[in-house]
Each structure stands twice: as C-alpha cells, then as structure tokens.
Image (tube, rainbow, N blue to C red):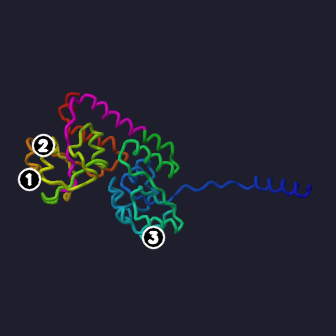
Amino acid sequence: MKLLSHSMRWLSAALLAVPVIASAAPERIVVVDGALTEIVYALGQEDKLVGVDTTSVYPAAATQLPQVGYKRALSAEGTLSLAPDLVIASEDAGPAGILGQIESAGVTVASVTAKASVDAVGEKVKRVAALLEQPDAGEALWQSIQADIETVQASQLRLSKPVKVLFILNASGGRNLVVGGANTHADAIIKLAGAENAVQGIEGYKPVTTEALVAMAPDVVLMMKRNEHSMPAAELFAIPGLDRVPAADNQRLVTMDGMLLLGFGPRIGRAMKQLHEALYPAVVAAQ
C-alpha cells in the first residue's frame, strides 16, 4: 500500500510538471457564405483566409481568393487542396456528404446559423469571432452593428403607415415572376426596414399568377441589382399584372445590391437604412 501511495504521488507530480499546450488558433481558413466572409474581414482576420465560396463577393478583395464553388454545391477536393485547418460554413451549406468528407480528412468544419434576423446576425458575429479567438473584437463589432440598427429603428417611429413592398427574385423576361413570401430573407429585410410584405399566404420564393400580382397591390417593387434579377422600371411595369398595381403609377422600383440586401451580415444596419430611405424618402427628408 505504501508503494502504491508513493507511486500515485509520483504520478501526480509528474502530471503537474507537464506543460499545458493551448490549442493553436486557426491559421488557414475557408469560409462558405458571403455574410461570414464579410464578418472575417470586419474582424480584421482576412489574412487567414485561403479560400471562399462564390457568394463571397464583398469586399471586392474576397473575389480574388481561390473559390471552392457555390455554397450548396461544394467540392471536397477543391476545398482540401487549399489545406485549411478550419472551414466556417453556414448551416445551409453542403452537400452534407461533402462536408463530412472534409471533416474525415481531419479539417474542423464549424457550422453557423443561416437565419434571417437581427439576433442571427449577432449570433454569426460572435460565433465567427469565437472560432477565430477574437471575442473582444466580435463584441465591439456587434455593438457597432446594433448602433446602426437602432438609428433606423428610431426613424421608423415616425411612420404613420407602412408601405407594401413586393420583392421579385426573378422576372424571367416578364414570365413566371418569382416573389418572396414568408420565411425568406426578403420578407425579413422588408419588415426590418419598416414596411409590409405585399406577399401573403405564400411560403418561400414561389412563382405567381397575373391575378395574384394584382391582388397583392404593392406600393413598391423591390429587386436585386443584378442583370439576371432586375430590369428597367418601364419594362417591369409593362408586365401584365404589374401594370395594374399602385407601384406602377409612379414607377416605384427599388433595386439594391443582392448581398447587401439579403446577406444578413455585418452590413445589416446599412441595408436597413438604405432600404428604409428608399421606401420613405419624404419621412427621411423631414427629419
């Protein structure tokens, strides 16, 4: 028993003498989602990026990095060829099997929320900051984002009646218009800007009929500022159905950069402000 007790004391002392080596912070990162890439840049950690997905278009410097494909159609081989020690991906990235292959190769894959809300933006910022071991920078970034959001929310208190906004994802040359209904990023940003989504009773992004467009009666049409997703107001409001809505009277078409509008990243306050000002120019001018 004395021998066992002596051995245990020796082992305890030996274990205490072993230096504790902290896990190294990631140095080679692949990011799969444009909003998450923006957060990495906003945290000043872009020097660790070795690759991004095709939705990572802001800032412009991100487009010069090696790409691993569209976030829902990733390539395991392409990703692993960049020798990352960490892949940060939105929860809607995939395919799941490809992410599994990347993990099986010994690469850490971290999933981040893809929800469209102010709270989700905060969750994204803090999660990415934690993964990069930059919690203080993450907290400071989130506080600045909240300040931008609160400025827009204060302006919304002056609104007497919300305008009805119709988000059109794709006009397809005037046929099969696809609009944004409930539980979409478009629906979320419209409401955050102090407006009402003209699309009711539809979930997700769906094509609609001419009769449905007339019944929606939007005051404003909102589209992304991309060649394949937008068109001139005169052309848009000549489309059957859209030619009979209130927005056609004054050709009220608002276009915005797609990643800014729907990305729900660190520029969420700027997106809310820009859309709010475009929807309520008279209210903003009177402030």
In this view, the residue in front, 144 or 5, is 5
| Horizontal side, residue 221 vs residue 128: left or right | left
Q: Which residues are magenta?
A: 143-170
Label 1: few (<14), some or many (≥20) within 10 Å?
some
User: Quick check: is 158 in the magenta stretch?
Assistant: yes
Q: Secondary structure at mark 3?
A: loop
Sequence-earlier tag: 1 or 3: 3
**Residue type of the residue flagged with mark 1:** Pro
Q: Position of residue 261 (x, y in %)?
A: 28, 48
| Horizontal side, residue 37 vs residue 21: left or right | left
| Total marks placed | 3
**Residue type of the residue flagged with mark 3:** Ser
Q: Residue at label 1?
A: 240
The circle on residue 247 is 2
Q: Residue at label 3?
A: 81
Quadrant location of the C terminus?
A: top left
Of tags 1 and 2, which is closer to the observer?
1
Q: Position of residue 170 (x, y in %)?
A: 20, 56
